[in-house]
Image (spheres, rainbow, N blue to C red):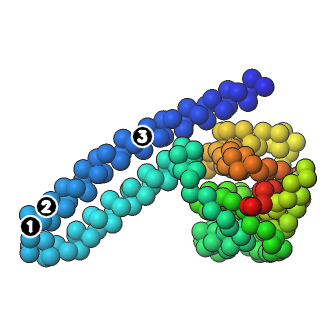
Amino acid sequence: TTRQLIMSEKLAAIGEITAGVAHEINNPIAVMQGNLEVIRAVMGDKAREAGTEFRLLDEQIHRISQIVTRLLQFAKPEEYAGYVERHAPDDVITDCLPLVQHLLNRSRVSVERRQQAQRMVLMNRTELQQVLVNLIVNALHAMPDGGRLTLATRDTEMEGRSGLTITVADTGIGMSAETLRKAFDPFFTTKRREGTGLGLSITRKLIDRQGGKIMVESEPGKGTAFMIWLPEAD
Ligand code: ADP
């Protein structure tokens, strides 16, 4: 539809801008890093007296370049598609939990895990993590008064192809029919200030690119379940 077309153009434009800015930041960072080395060499023994300061500068420059890399990865995922590896999705879920632990600690949400998948998926680990963290954070937002977060995996077939399904389900506020219809649209959010409305559209883009599918079931007042189907890695 026209609306979807406009949305995906908007998303593509944001990707271009973000990638452009990230590239622009990379150059001055490289210059700073290089000059820091020169200063250290020129100072010789004196550089050791400022060891802590130099280390801080190194660390912070490294941090900026990591942020830029992540931004680029987000804006131009095609350029990072080479990183795919075989993963057991349950391992990736286990890796995600520390990233949301601070949110879990502040909430009255219990986590239930059902690890039944035997199969492996072929995916970029960071991307799969990004997808899962997006869904988990949304689930926690939907349960301000507590509830249960279910993280489940099982081997499944989809249209005759073998793969597995990762379920992220909550017992939260659920979605109205209208929200459900628009949930994956870029910039659609019901969260006002905190929301970007990009989480689910990016999630779907990443899953599509792996030949997977993302489905959602939701009932107002009952909760929401996102199911990600991914093809099995050969
Ligand atoms: P954001 O979280 O920034 O709003 P998303 O694209 O991740 O952006 O989500 C879009 C909208 O979909 C949310 O604002 C919310 O209305 C709805 N939504 C997503 N996940 C859930 C969930 N688990 N429960 C209820 N509503 C949800």
> Camera-side residue: 234 or 60?
234
According to the picture, the residue beneath numbered tag 3 turns out to be 21
**CA gap, disc 1 to disc 3?**
33 Å
Q: Amino acid type of disc 1?
A: Met
Q: Identify the mark at residue 43; answer none if there is no mark.
A: 1
User: In the rendered image, is residue 52 in sight?
Assistant: yes
Q: Residue furthest front?
A: 234
Q: Residue at x 83, y 44 (%)?
A: 180
| Local secondary structure at mark 3 | helix
Q: Residue at x 29, y 51 (%)?
A: 30
Relative vertical location of residue 81 with respect to residue 108 in this rendering, above or below: above
Question: Where, by quadrant of the figure, is residue 36 drawn?
Answer: bottom left
- From the top left corner, tell me how far across and down residue 95 is, in percent: 63, 72
According to the picture, the residue beneath numbered tag 2 turns out to be 39
**CA gap, disc 1 to disc 2?**
6 Å
Is the Cβ of the residue at disc 3 closer than 8 Å to that at disc 2?
no
Q: Amino acid type of disc 3?
A: Val
User: Which image quarter holds the C terminus?
Assistant: bottom right
**CA gap, disc 3 to disc 2?**
28 Å
- From the top left corner, tell me how far across and down residue 8 is, in percent: 66, 32
User: Could you tell whether 33 is left or right of 150 in the image?
Assistant: left
| Local secondary structure at mark 1 | helix
User: Could you tell whether 117 is left or right of 132 in the image?
Assistant: right
Relative vertical location of residue 231 with respect to residue 177 in this rendering, above or below: below
| Local secondary structure at mark 2 | helix
Instruction: Respond yes or no on whether mark 3 lies under 8 Å from ligand 1.
Output: no
Q: Residue at x 70, y 50 (%)?
A: 210
| Label located before the other in sequence (1 or 3) | 3
User: Could you tell whether 49 is left or right of 193 in the image?
Assistant: left
Q: Residue furthest top?
A: 2
> Camera-side residue: 124 or 199?
124
